[in-house]
Every structure is written in structure tokens, then in C-alpha cells.
Amino acid sequence: MPTSFQLPEAFLWGASTAAHQIEGMNVNSDFWAFEHSGLLPERFREMSGDACDSYHRWREDMDLLAELGFTDYRFSIEWARIEPAPGEFSNAEIAHYRRMVAGAIERGLRPMLTLHHFTVPRWFDEQGGWESEDAVELFGRFVEAAAPIFASNVDHICTINEPNMVARFAAIRKAVLAGNVWEEVGTDKYDEAATVALINAHRRAVGVIRRLTPHIKVGWSVAIANHHAVDGGELKAAEIASAARDVFVLAADGDDWIGVQAYTRVFVGPDGQLPVPEGAQKTLTGWEYYPPALGESIRSVARLVPRTPIIVTENGIAESDDAVRVAYTSGALAGMRDALAAGIDIRGYYHWSALDNYEWGSFVPTFGLIAVDRKTFVRTPKPSAAWLGAAGQSRAIELISDDLMSESVV
Ligand code: BGC
């Protein structure tokens, strides 16, 4: 049954992107080097190349989002461009991102800036990345140098996107470099040194932002996987959730907000994560189609940090059939609506993603509200974009499917 969902007062309503996934030619970043190293598993060997060419076409992206009705846009700035060599900062790149912030405001889009979305400069990676001794110092220095970008007209900063995925990627990469097969690296492996460094880097960035720009509401965004225990997997599920989620969520206690990023759920047995059950509907990433993921994630985060307001900074689906995107998002938003009704303090929702973009090794999983032609870069909004965007102006959205909460989540 369709139901109308009224957005709360002052609710942020936007779409999200990340620099490496849309800008193109991010040649000085570690991921560009990684794409060319041959270390990625075979099905993830596509190069990011020009991506969506948003480095040049950001105005078009913002025009579309504003025309569609969105009031907010989350995008990231690229450390590898701003600090191409240690301590060498590019005023031109800082000016580029300042123009983007001003351009968003001019169009009626409130920018949320992500300072780190998975990629780092090559030099930072080459000297040991998050595990090097001065990683925290170096990140703090970058944030301080980037301050002119967010000094005015930015109300929200996300310091680090999905630090838990960064820690997981660090563990996988170490294992692969040691000769292990990518797919066989245990799903419960999260690099401990990287975890500690990322939490300290976040705290350092929060300190810099509070000192230089105290008006900004600062937080970070955590990937919430929703671990469902089956066949006696309760202990293992709790163990994975602790390393994969809890330490990163608890580190946000006392921040101005915490970002929830939710897509699906995973099943965990006594020996670890299980494959998606046979017969389950899957998306283009191979994940289970599971709209209640958002409501579940919000509730588990609210249980861990009840004093910290939540912003949904990512939620979406890799699908070629746009009607499925609308159905999925309806179900997810119904879960968010119910969490709001239960009294959870949720301040906004950003859909992932504004554009069909580079999904870390492949352009095949299309998460976008807006399609992008891979050769001409022509943008074409999908019906889901009009449906979701309109709510930014009307402040209400018609949901076509409802949420079914599962009880067994950790
Ligand atoms: C990341 C995005 C990614 C998306 C879908 C999140 O893990 O922040 O960069 O594209 O999920 O996989």
C-alpha cells in the first residue's frame, strides 16, 4: 500500500558521491596505482580512467540535482590533488573545491564535505599509509591546509568515509601482498593498526575543525553490514560486529552526528560470514536485495551511541532496472520513517549515488539516480531521481513498499 512519508523539519535531503568514483584522471591517488597493479581480483580490473569526468562537469551534476529538487549534496575533496607531494599544497586545487562549495550554495544545495573517501595520495600510501608512524599528523596537516575550502558555507563535514572498510581493505591488501588469494581472505579480518590510526586521525580532524571552524557539525560515516546470526553463529556474529562496526561507531560518541551507510545484510555462522542464501534476490554487486537494512542499521547505531544524532549518508542499490531502485528505496525509507517514529534522532538522508559511477574496480554495478554515458558523459536522470528529488521541495514522499524488520540482527 502506498503511504506518504512527511520529512521532518530541516531534514537534509540529498545524494552522495565520492571524488575518485566520479572525477576521473585521479592519477596521483593510491587507488589509481592499485588499479594498474594487477592486484585486484579479475572481475574488478576495470580502470577508473575519466570516470564521469565530474572534475570538469561538476556544475552539470549540481544543476541536475538542484533541478530534481534535492536540497543537499555530499561530495568529497581529493587529498591526492590537494597535496600531490608531501607538504606541497596546490592553491589551484583548493580554489577548485572552493568553487564547488560556492557553486552548490548558488544552486540551493547545502554541501556536506567528505575529507577522505577511500583514496589517499600515492606518496602517503608508499610511505606506509594508515600504518605509518606519522599518518595521523599528516592527515591533520592536510585537513588544516584544506580549511579554506570549508571555512564558509559548509555546515557538515564527514572526516572519513567508512573507516571500517578502509581497515578491512588494509587487511586484505596485506594478505594479498603476502601471496594470499583475494577472495579467500577471511571476511572477519580488519587491520588493527589501521583501525587505531583511523580513529586517531578522525579525532585529530575533529580537533582541527572545532578549532578553525567551530560552526561546522562534524562526524564520520560507518558502513553498517547488519550481521544476522544463523545455525549457532551468535558468538561469531557478535565478534565480527565488534571489529567491523562497534569500535568505529563508539569512536563517534560525542561527535555532532554519526553517518549510517546501509545496503544489505550478511549471514554469519559459527565459522564466519556465509554466502547469500540460494534463491535470494541479488543486486549487481552480488549483495542480497534487502531494504530493511537501513532501519536495522539505524537502530543498531542508535543503541550503541544513543546521544549522537544520525545522518544517513549512504543508502542505495546497484540495479539496472530503475523500478527496483524505487521499490528498494521505498522499503529502506519506510524503515527510516519507523525509526524516526520510535524517537531516534535522524537528521537527514543522502542517497548513494547521484551518478552511475566507478564502483572500485568496475563500472557495472550502477548505483546512480542519474545515468552517465561512458563515452560522451551525457547525464540522463532516471525516474528514481525525479521521485526522490521531488521530496526535497514537497517535503513528502510516496512510498510504494513497506519495510519488514527482521528480529535476528546483532
Ligand atoms: C562506499 C562507496 C561505494 C558504495 C557501494 C560504500 O561502501 O562509501 O564508495 O561505492 O558503498 O559499494
Image (spheres, helix red, strand yellow):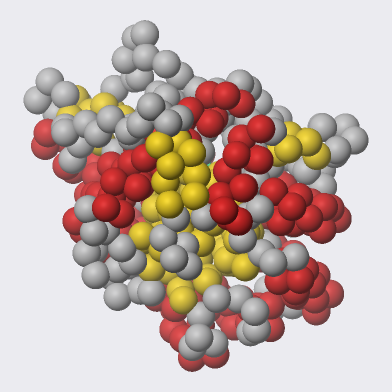
Residue found farthest to the bottom: 211
Taking the spot 42% from the left edge, 16% from the top edge, the residue there is 281
Q: Position of residue 205 (x, y in %)?
A: 48, 77
Q: Nearer the viewer, residue 390 or 284?
A: 390
Q: Is residue 180 visible?
A: no
User: With respect to residue 272, does 218 lie above or below?
Assistant: below
User: With respect to residue 160, does 329 lie above or below?
Assistant: above
Q: Is residue 89 visible?
A: yes
Q: Nearer the viewer, residue 307 or 139?
A: 307
The answer to whether 325 appears left or right of 381 in the picture is left
Q: Position of residue 326 (x, y in %)?
A: 53, 31
Quarter of the figure with the C terminus:
top left
Taking the spot 34% from the left edge, 19% from the top edge, the residue there is 275
The answer to whether 141 appears left or right of 294 in the picture is right
User: With respect to residue 154, does 387 lie above or below?
Assistant: above
Q: Position of residue 393 (x, y in %)?
A: 60, 56
The answer to whether 324 appears left or right of 278 in the picture is right
